[in-house]
Image (tube, coloured by chain):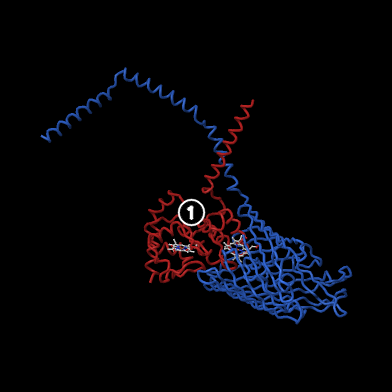
Amino acid sequence: MNINRVAKTIVFAVVTSSFSTAALAEPSVEELAERLERMQQEMDQLKQQLKNSATKDEVQVIKKDVATAGEWLQPDTLIHMAGYADVGYTDSESEDGSFNVGTFAPIFHFQYRDLVMLESELEFEVGDDGETETNLEYLTIDWFINDYMVLVGGKFLSPVGQFRQNLHPSWINKLPSAPPGFGHDGAAPVSDVGFQLRGGFPIGAIRTNYAVYISNGPELIAEFEDGEFELDGVEAEGFGSDGDGEKVVGGRLGIIPFSGFELGLSAASGKATVTSIEDGDSSTLSDEGARDYDVIGADFSWHYKAFNLRGEYVETEVGADTGSGTAASEGATWETWYTQGAYRFNQSNWELVARYTDFDSPHNSQDQQQWAIGTNYLFTNNFIGKLSYEFNDGQAGSDADQDRFLFQMAYGF
Amino acid sequence: MNILIWKSVSTLSKRTALLLLTALVIQPLYALDYPEEGDFAQGTKAWSENCARCHNMRSPSDLRDDQWVTSVFHMRVRAGLTGQEARDILTFLQGSNARVENIDPGQVESTTTDSASISGKQIYESNCLACHGANGKGSIPGVPDFNEKNGRLSKSDSELLSNIITGIQSPGSSMPMPPRGGNSQLSDTDLNAALKYIKASFSE
């Protein structure tokens, strides 16, 4: 009986469906007219709707607006600001402790696609007298010639060694102070004005990086002492003009035989001339001869897990002036080296640092041996609190002999 | 007259609102057409080998995509990197700086099928090894040792997997683990395979 009902249903379904297909297959004229009417109505409705919605032109305008709104996000020119700042406290044996604003050093980057970049760092410092000093630390235009060469022109950090060009920013330097001889007016050149070719290339699995430069070179300072002139210092701070017209050429080659270890060799050679007298009247200078100027340096860095050991040696040698110059004198040699070990505790923000430096200058009062030890707290990898103590050993009574306690907070952004 | 001015002001503000909105919406979608796309896996390696040479490793999440362009070019000059290394590193950094999960279903789906055959070992080696090391001990500071007893791997699989997918920065940690190891092309299945490989190879 059940089956009967199912069969009936099937028959009914088949019959009705065939009827309806028959009806579809042969629509009557009235039916067609009716349908046409309906379509007409729908068309009118659609037209009305279209009027209310955006036209093609309007859509085009909005599209354009959207494109320009996004323009600043995908420009050919990028502008970026980076830099660092530090504040601190220094207490030395012979002086009362004082707070200090070390530096504020904003860096500006302007980049046009992957063709050229302008980088410039300004350095603001508040001196002991409350005056704010401003320095153009560097300003270069970097032209990316190809994958292995970048031409850098302008005032640049000296490529000799590692400290000046790569380690001196306070968020990078693991101690609050520069190693003796690597600061301004020491054994290591600071900056220079000229052109530099930089880049890197692999030799098999070995990475190398290079920098060669030609520049105005440094100027020399003479000093009148005990009845005669002698050399006081080398000012290798990037002079915008070249008094003696003699250029300096130099460079550095870095070799990374395996990841974690780098060895660098640097050299520079040229001429330099006395242009000023320390605490004296520089206008009395005349007929100064261009002296030989030679720098050699070597550096290494080794990372092993959380341990980092690095060291650097630099020697600057200035020849004698045998001419008739006012400040004609013997030559002089500045030499310094440091080794620094740092250990970061596993899974913690604490870091220990120790550094030994031996700076040897032609002036006994500037010679210095230093042990610096420090503890750092890394709030983040670029915001660091540093606490350090320096055991300084120099000529008795000189500044170089005063032990110091330093505290610094440095932030790289 | 008054009405006209009012009308134009209101359409103007509407337009501005629209512009701002679209700008906001398309921001995550924009991509610079230079430099050319680098190789992500090579970039992870080059980054871990080069970017801690002079200073503490800067975390990928420190900077936005366009900011990384200038910083990487800056660093290319400083560190003497080749153009290719710089492009690879940039690709890695731009892929790894996302804080939240990248919602891009199209991308994920399309790669699920063709990368399903890649083994967990292969995924680990080309995406995770640069940071976690071949032995799972971590090759740069801030990366945990997977071999430690009661260490990270003692967490449940589902917790680990979700941390891999969304990224994680534990309190006091100096470096975050980027979402999907920085490679948004990896599907959940791929990451699960990599996790299986990690568990099989490193936990005691």
Q: Residue A23 falls in which quadrant of the image?
A: top left
Q: Which residue lies furthest to the top in this view?
A: A30
Rendered blue, the chain in question is A
| Quarter of the image that includes the N terminus of chain A | top left
Residue A136 percent across, percent down from the top left? 73, 60
Going by the numbered disc 1, the residue's amino acid type is Val
Residue B105 placement, left or right of A11: right
How packed mark 1 is, by other alpha carbons closer than 10 Å (few <14, some 14-19, many 20 or more), is: few
Residue A71 placement, left or right of A186: left
- What residue is at 52 percent from the left and 49 percent from the top? B28
- What residue is at 54 percent from the left and 32 percent from the top? A57
Residue picked out by circle 1: B100
Q: What element carries label 1?
A: loop
| Quarter of the image that includes the C terminus of chain A | bottom right
| Chain letter for the residue marked with disc 1 in the picture | B
- What residue is at 66 percent from the left and 62 percent from the top? A85
Residue B14 percent across, percent down from the top left? 57, 36
Q: Which residue lies furthest to the bottom in this view?
A: A396
Q: Is residue A187 above or below residue A104?
A: below
> A219 or A244, which lies in front?
A219
Q: Which residue lies furthest to the left in this view?
A: A1
Residue A60 placement, left or right of B181: right
Residue A257 placement, left or right of A106: left
Residue B177 percent across, percent down from the top left? 48, 61
Which colour denotes chain B? Answer: red
Q: Residue B75 falls in which quadrant of the image?
A: bottom right
